[in-house]
Amino acid sequence: MNHITAADETGAPMIVISRDACGLRPAKHELEHVRPHPGIIIHCTGGQRPASLEHAMKRWRIVQLSHQRERGWADIGYHFGVTPDGQVLEGRGFGVLGAHAKGHNRLLGVVVLGKGTEITPAEERAIEAIHAALLAGGGGAVVMPHNAVSRKSCPGPAVTAWMRQRWPEDPIGR
């Protein structure tokens, strides 16, 4: 089931494809609640970018499986995923602790599907809509790439460059 969560800066609605519609399994146990989230950390999954929504949802299920089986986490670590055509996939959703950036899991984890070597205008709008929804819910304005809090290249050069342009005042690992 899809539902409208917020609007991006142009006023276009942000449609979130629910966990159920993506085919995610329930979390292994109840997740710790967090209110409000102080901001967002942007990630990339690595690997090939999905060519269709069906492929994106399959990748989303694989990410959850990896996080649960290989890392031993209760659920997918990210709160939301963003597809190349700007669809938003629900992971943990708002209001719960993430598992995506050690020491920074109170922030929303938003992941771009792919290596982060490109970012589409639709992905940009989706990330901006998630940010707008966070602000509307009383969350913090900080937006930073994963590489600002880790030694990884995530979320990739194109996504990081876009973030530096879009949110120049935020700490983004310069």
Image: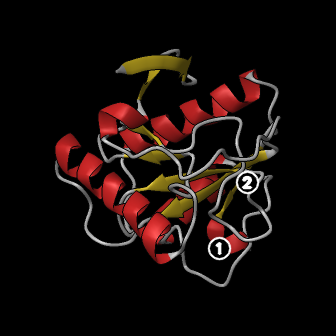
| Residue closer to the observer: 133 or 64 | 64
The N terminus sits in image quarter: top left
State the residue at coordinates (70%, 42%): 96
Using the image, tell me which numbered label, if any, was put on residue 57.
none
Image quadrant in which you'd find residue 88: top left
Residue 124 is left or right of residue 118, and the answer is: right
Is residue 48 something one can see in this rendering? yes
Relative to 128, say whether 148 is above or below.
below
Q: Neighbour class for label 1 at 10 Å: few (<14), some, many (≥20)?
A: many
Extreme front residue here?
29
Using the image, tell me which numbered label, if any, was put on residue 147.
1
Q: Foreground mark, 2 or 1?
A: 1
| Dot 2 amino acid type | Pro
Looking at the rendered structure, the secondary structure element under dot 2 is: loop
Residue 156 is left or right of residue 92, and the answer is: left
Residue 95 screen position, x and y as percent? 71, 35
Q: Neighbour class for label 2 at 10 Å: few (<14), some, many (≥20)?
A: few
The C terminus sits in image quarter: bottom right
Q: Earlier in the sequence, mark 2 or mark 1?
A: 1
Residue 107 is left or right of residue 72, and the answer is: right
| Dot 1 amino acid type | Asn
Is residue 161 something one can see in this rendering? no
Q: Which residue is mark 2?
A: 168
State the residue at coordinates (38%, 63%): 65
Residue 56 screen position, x and y as percent? 27, 50
State the residue at coordinates (56%, 44%): 92
Relative to 20, say whether 105 is above or below.
below
- By what rule are the colours in the image chosen? secondary structure
Residue 77 screen position, x and y as percent? 56, 58
Relative to 76, say whether 20 is above or below.
above
> Could you give the CA–CA distance between mark 2 and mark 1, rounded to whole angstroms?
15 Å
